Image: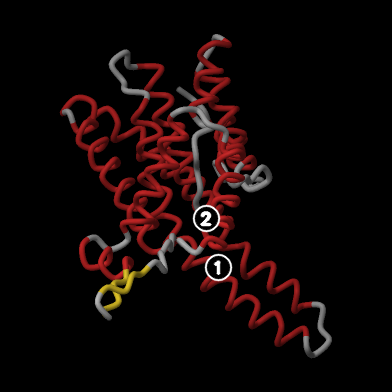
Amino acid sequence: MNNKKELKSVFWRSFPLQGGFNYERMQNIGFCYAMIPIIKKLYTTKEDQSKALKRHLEIFNTTPAVSPIILGITAAMEEENTKSKNFDENSINAVKASLMAPLAGIGDSLFWGTFRVIAAGIGVSIAKQGSILGPLLFVLLYNVPNFIVRIGGLKYGYQLGIQSLDKFQKNGMMDKIMSIATIIGLSVVGGMIATMLTIETPLKWTISGSSIEIQKILNEIFPNLLPLLFTFLVYKLIQRKVSITWITIGIVVFGIAAHVIGIL
């Protein structure tokens, strides 16, 4: 199927990826917006189009410059979904989830930590001399690699998906990829809980002159147990369709109350 025109639209639509950024599902609106041309081309009924759009409103977050790689692979998977009756639609979001964090690590290092710093250093040094070339060089040095990665990423991401999916479906590799993607996703979430969420209790008792610190005991039995339990609680509330807004408000109120009482 010739999707060159639609892929060009996907490419240009990848630039406002963060235009609809939100703290509930991050770049999901931008990703869904970028996928619209492909979805309209591949799916002929409004029902199928709506189902595909909802699929891409799941949480998504990565470095914008590398997002076309995932968009290309996703476009190929959506195309395969229209061709194969046995294609597992859940694998589309599973592959997206498994790719966005590793690619974000590479993208952040390259674009935020390398290209931007080098471009800013050269641009500022020239701008200090009163030359208009300073800001122009900054824009060029940062955006030329950005465009190259975006164009190549979308092209080769799509080709990789088209070439590989057929083989994966036939030899049962897709099930293995799904399993690996799930493991990677859970590992990333687990790592984020352990490193980014800090919940400790200052509670302690004095018995026969000895001080017993609850947090110290918890750390010896199960480090980061409180953050893990808190995450499971939030997950359960989301499963029960509790609004993210109400969960956020509840966390803020509980946090303030727990601190005032002195249990956290």
Q: Earlier in the sequence, mark 1 or mark 2?
A: 2
Determine whether 14 is above or below 3 in the image.
Answer: below
Query: In the rendered view, does 94 fall on the left or right side of 244?
Result: left
Residue reaching furthest bottom?
129
* Disc 2: CA contacts within 10 A as few (<14), some (14-19) or many (>=20): many
Q: Return the residue nearer the eye: 137 or 190.
A: 190
Q: Is residue 179 left or right of residue 250?
A: left
Image mark count: 2
Name which residue type carries label 2: Thr
Do the residues bearing badges 1 and 2 touch, measured as CB atoms within 8 Å?
yes
User: In x, y percent, where is residue 57?
Assistant: 54, 32
Considering only vertical position in the picture, is 3 above or below 15?
above
Quarter of image, res 8: top right
Q: Which mark is residue 63?
A: 2
Find residue 148 and report its horizontal and vertical position in percent. 54, 56
Residue identifier under label 1: 112
Q: For the residue labelled by badge 2, is the local secondary structure a helix, a strand or a loop? A: loop
Which residue lies at the image location 34% right of the left edge and 52% below the top edge? 228
**Foreground residue among 166 and 81:** 81
Q: Identify the residue shown where x is 66% and y is 46%.
A: 16
Q: Is residue 22 above or below residue 261?
A: above
